[in-house]
Image: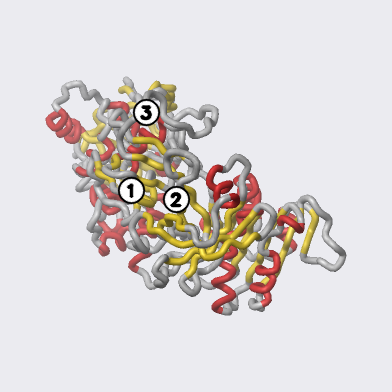
Amino acid sequence: MATLLSVNVGLPKDVPWQGRTVHTGAWKAPVQGSRMVRRLNVDGDGQGDLAGHGGEMRAVLVYQLQSYQYWQKQLGRDDLTFGIFGENFTVDGLPDDEVCIGDRYRIGEAEFEVSQPRVTCYRVGMRLGEPTMASLLVAHHRPGFYLRVIAEGRVQAGDAVTLTRKGPEQLSVADADALLYLPDRDPAKLRKALNIPALSPGWQQSFRELAAPEQPAQEPGQPGEQPGEEPGWPGFRPMRVTRIVPETPTISSLYLAATDGTSLPEARPGQYLSIRLVTDHAAPEVRSYSLSRASTAGTYRISVKREPHGKVSDYIHARLRPGDLVDIASPRGTFVLQERPGPTVLVSAGIGATPVLAMLHQLAATGDPRAVWWIHTAHDRAHHAFADETRTLLARLPGAGEYIYYTGETPRPDEPHITHGRPTAASLRAMGIPAEADAYLCGPSAFMDDLARFLRDLGLRPQQIHTERFTALPAITPGVTATAVIRPHQPPGPTATGPLVTFARSGISTPWSPAHATLLDLAEACDIPTRWSCRTGVCHTCVTHLVAGDITYTTPPLELPEPGTVLVCCSKPTTEVVLDL
């Protein structure tokens, strides 16, 4: 019979780490006597990052004496005291390869249910001083697991752990963990996982996404490229500018074709191209621009707004001419029109019209019968890009409606589809947008945040609302205390001599230096917004499109990402690289 050896608690505190401050509850220590276990945690315990830890499904973390003994040998450590793995309960028994999701246990006065394996997180490595610990826990099949509290009560060291009910499907903690984080997944086990009511909603969602490629169509509401989809060509290729068409005083469209006249791979509506130009600066500049129409007759079209102080957009408007050659990377991007039919809302502001305009072209080209809402905001008539083009496309769609907003001009009486101001919750409600619609939003961040909130109020679920940001994506840095936002810049210190690394979304190009352990470290040194969690190649939160170049992994990831992408948390460049970051 298993036994509870130690009850460990700790309140969140600020801990210095790599020049930053992390608010974490990973520092836990044994307590004497009994403790009350409640629905959300043990009395005296807390979690610093409630997005990744804690809550009803992750109230209590369990780790085993046998795993302590294993890691003592593996790591050559004799200082592993109970609680150092962040667990609340240290137990003798309950191995990860025998305990199953949904198992229930009585400990002292309380009853618990196994809800999921431990979340992979850099903080366990931070606590132990072993940076790769999150990866090791998964690779060695010793993650530990979370418990949901079924019945509250007091527990203490020495209490017996009694199995009261076996979970359905008999899927062990170790198998569930491997199913999410390791390659060569067993489809039968994946189906089992989806049939376990006790499994936490977050893990259920992850397994549904993994199961989606096995289905005839993509899981409804999930944006992104089809798994396994490869870019049309590696890196950059020269293409010729065939036409430049002014759309407004500040926006021009570039038509691009292959230099040898051959056809181009078809782009998915909503994707973008990365363009590389040598301007007046020493290093080539890379920027990404959405395709503003479907690729036709071997031609791509991008539309570029001339931005104040924009080096590349200024060069395109002032100096680029038809016949010039530019370097172009293959169409990329996960902001794409879903194949499933149903009501579709296309929302944009300013130059944000470009990717949703490509979607509108696709719908019009196929005569799609679905209901379509075209909602666009511009400053005035002169700056309303693609006005005639969109009206022509919408006329081909019997179920389409057009809703235009001018912030700086009053519409004419004969233009009932144009409103002065901006879209509001009330105006969206009056449009009759149904709760089952898919919405695609592109524009300034504040605009998209407001519109997404209005759409959620109408009943759309978050997974039905797809957004595209032209700038760097919002950072994901779990537990790190927020600081003032700093504009991306060159890294401090002397100029390095390694391969050039370009962060396309942030407009930064800088030589690689071995002083940085990984591409993620270099991005952080440049104050580029980054997205990560485990920092050891497990969780894939940091996955980034590799536009051009080659990398090598400093720590081999447990599962390689999709072709054309890279895990920046554990990689470095071997050639000049361009990252969509």
Residues at marks 2 and 3, CA–CA distance in whole angstroms: 22 Å
Residue 455 in percent (x, y) is at 63, 56
Residue visible at 35% across and 40% down in the picture: 500
Callout count: 3
Q: Secondary structure at mark 1?
A: strand
In this view of the protein, which residue sits in the foreground, 402 or 63? 402
Residue type at mark 3: give it.
Thr
Q: Which residue is mark 1?
A: 566
The residue shown at (63%, 72%) is: 371
According to the picture, the residue beneath numbered tag 2 turns out to be 276
The kind of residue on which mark 2 rests is Arg
**Mark 1 is on which residue type?**
Val
**Can the viewer see residue 87 in this picture?**
no
Given residues 172 and 1, the one toward you in this image is: 172
Q: What coloring was used for the rendering? A: secondary structure
Residue 76: give its label: none
Q: Is residue 5 above or below residue 326?
A: above
